[in-house]
Image (tube, grey):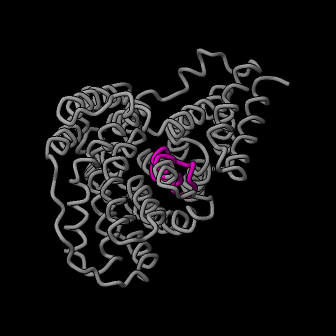
Amino acid sequence: MDAKNISLLIFLSAYLLFIFLPKRRTLVAVAGALALILSGALSFKEAFFSVNWNVMGIFVGTLVIADIFMESRVPAYIAEIIINKAGNTAWAILLICLLTGFISAFVENVATVLIVAPIALSLARKLKINPMQMMIAIAVSSNLQGAATLIGDPPSMLLGGFARMNFFDFFFYKGRMSIFFAVELGAFVSFIVLYFIFRKHKEKVALVQIEKVKSWVPTVILVSLIVFLALSSLFDTGFSYAAGVICMVFAVIAALWEKLVNKSSLLEGMRSLDWETTFFLIGVFILVGSITLTGWIESISGALSGLVGNNLFLGYTLLVLTAVVVSAFVDNVPFLAAMLPVAISMSAKLGVNPSLFLFGLLIGASLGGNITPIGASANIVACGLLKKEGYEVRFKDFMKIGLPFTFAAVIAAYLFVWFIWGK
């Protein structure tokens, strides 16, 4: 069996096992990655560079800061303010999701989830509710708003670099409303979906005693991190290294502060990090990299291009639909990278502005990952944090929120792009 078929077999087997053996997902991912290397389908070098080490730097670095931020009691303090301001539990959860969306428009999704998670978990503890649905809602809200601006998410940065779009082009491009407004329309419609999901939580939120903050220093470190992450896109337009390095540098600063001020053990702090999710992410990156490097993504792209013919609406619809379905299971960065040239060639063949296909592709690729718990790095991280708290997220648990949320957001954004750019 050649490398191309071996990679597909291992990829499909691993993803099926993710569904049926969710408690062994890290073992499955690492075993699948090792199988690819030992079978010769991927070399060690190819496997190493398949991992998005920038995202891994963001994950590990922000995880360190998030733990120290949690210990400062500031998240609990913010949670109590939200509880006291919200009329009931449902609106407390929805306000958390709005906060997530705002941060995610300027900060990468994984970092956003790790920033908001301590606040959400503190909120759940104070309200004595299961945090699962709230954490899932945070993950999908982050993935949605990450597509709104150039610096919100790697796919946006990838599209911006490919189409040579600057930060303001995401708002208005060539005299027309751009991707930001499509995403915000999708966010409005999907917010209604979240309201219907959480509306049953009508419990009145009683005023509670305000938490005493131990220190504001971790908050200052966190806010500084957000500012630096937003600025990083100015010199790292290809999302290649800066964000990960920044997160790791700030993690070292936070860990040293914790060691010097609170006399905490650095070794114990390292042991408490979510290494299981860390290795799961590495394994998934290698699995996805195998089907990208062996040409399966290009094969899918070529087949789609052949189906389009000269029908503009059909081509646009198939492109968005394919992006949604594939991105539900495959990391959207390599998929988008492979599909961008296809979108350009399709638009040239049909004689239309390429922005129609490019924006549609970004919507489908960014939002499709919200369908499943393995469709986006932010989802994996959110599920990992829940597991650390003792909550196991099954596929059906995630899809109860992810599927209707994605359907509403994609339809609204898809129609907006068509009416603005389909002429």
- Residue 209 is one of the magenta-drawn residues: no
Image location (x, y in percent) of residue 13: 76, 41
Q: Is residue 274 left or right of residue 160?
A: right
Task: Give the side of residue 316 with respect to residue 226, left or right.
Answer: right
Instruction: Judge left or right: residue 308 versus residue 142.
Output: right
The quadrant of the image that shows the C terminus is bottom left
Q: How many numbered dots are placed on residues in this image?
A: 0
Q: Nearer the viewer, residue 318 or 32?
A: 32
Residue bounds of the magenta highlight = 362-382
Seen from this angle, which residue lies furthest right? Answer: 1
Does the stretch in magenta take in 374? yes
* Location of residue 421 (image quadrant): bottom left
Tell me if residue 119 can be seen: yes
User: Residue, x 67% and y 44% (percent of image)?
Assistant: 24
Q: Position of residue 201 (x, y in %)?
A: 40, 80
At a point 56% along the width and 33% down the height, the residue shown is 285
In the rendered image, which quarter is residue 204 located in?
A: bottom left
Percent x, y of residue 414: 46, 61
Classify residue 396 by image quadrant. bottom right
411 shown above or below 207: above
Q: Is residue 128 left or right of residue 234?
A: right
Image quadrant holding the N terminus, namely top right
Q: Main secondary structure of the magenta part?
A: helix
Please indicate, yes or no, whether residue 366 appears anywhere in the rendered image: no
Q: Position of residue 224 (x, y in %)?
A: 17, 38
Q: Residue at x 55, y 43 (%)?
A: 346
Which is nearer the eye, 248 or 123? 123
